Image: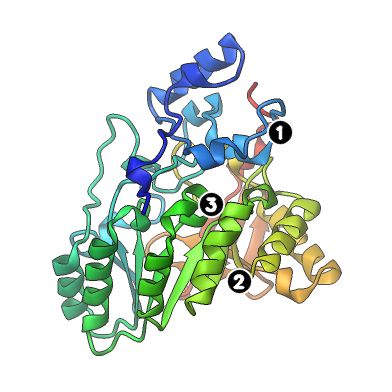
Amino acid sequence: MTHPRRAAAALCEPGRLPLSARARAEVARVAERYPMRIPPHLAACIDWSDPRCPVRRQLVPDRRELEPGGAADPLDEERFCLAPGVVRRFEDRLLAIVTHACPVHCRHCNRKRLWRRGGEHGLEVAGPEQIALALRRAPGAREVILSGGEPLLLSDRALGERLEAARAAPGVELVRIHSRAPVSVPERITPALARRLGRERPLWFVTHFNAAREVTPRAARAVARLLQAGVPVLNQAVLLRGVNDSFAALEALGRALVRVGVKPHTLFQLDHAEGVLHFQVPLRRAVELVGALRRRASGLLVPHLLVDLPGRGGKVAVGPDTIRRWTRRGAWLRGADGRERFYFDGGAGGSAGAAW
């Protein structure tokens, strides 16, 4: 197979971008703090003549990333590590960060601290031993999620070892892989890997398409290999200002996903990570958009609108029973633990226009 780490080089140098000299200089300034990494497949998806291209907005550094605000660890993951690299924010599931490496640096990433230049973090990497240790410490866990970074950057053998460790505890009912590989490095999903994952069922593959433009023929082939191996594929998108914050964009994304056999499962409100707040869409607007989808589009296209609250607040489906009250600065939501937490909409006031 062609492993992504040996494939064509990613676009990492601002000087190679087909932009004006001034724009490249701005990109370079941002990349000094938050490096740029665009794999060849996604670079080919960008319309470089259109500053509004949704793929370009997700991947090309923007000077607004340097504006103050946001948390390094917006979900308090490091505070809830049960073992090195294994997070337990929910009683019934564990999140294993199996690598920090990623083939693409999405500008809206909620773990931006893992690849920020000069940044420090306390989130380690989980190998099979750490996963097994965490499961011994959490006998009530029924699900294990392999995430990263990009878990599919591991070799087939290394990925298999972590899957086996996750399966070893008698209470574990299923394993999930959260991966953007179908979008960023679809060649990584080889027939051999798909067959291997098919033998690990019950296993769910959760991927991350944000725009219809990302559902390319190569991405569709990668998804088809998983489906043919018996692995169900769901999509979790993030609602991003200037990328998919319109009815037309969300409908197009949903239709593109359903055509290739992927269910649009969740639409997340932006996590308040450092360097991402220019992507924030007001929560009221998010509720309106999903409501419009429910009224005007096929039910297969409608995702759950979720807010992931820090700590043990949980992933909260936004609706009348969860929004306790609105304010001018955001909304008070009832978390999974019954406590009220504030979701701050203050980062949504900036311009949705491109930086260049």
Mark before the other along the chain sequence, 1 or 2: 1
Return the x and y of residue 212 as percentages of the image width and height: 69, 52
Residue 273 in which image quadrant: top left
Return the x and y of residue 275 as percentages of the image width and height: 47, 36
Choose between 113 and 67: the one closer to the eye.
113
Render colour scheme:
rainbow
Q: Which mark is residue 183?
A: 3
Height in image: 15 above or below 5? above
Q: Left or right: where does residue 87 sit relative to residue 326?
A: left
Label 2 packing within 10 angstroms: few (<14), some (14-19), many (20+): some
Q: Which residue is identified by label 1?
A: 52
The three-letter amino acid code for the residue at tag 2 is Thr
Residue 353 in which image quadrant: top right
Q: Residue at x 71, y 60 (%)?
A: 256
Query: Does residue 76 appear in the picture of this structure?
Result: no
Return the x and y of residue 282 as percentages of the image width and height: 67, 49
Q: Which mark is residue 322?
A: 2
Label 3 packing within 10 angstroms: few (<14), some (14-19), many (20+): many
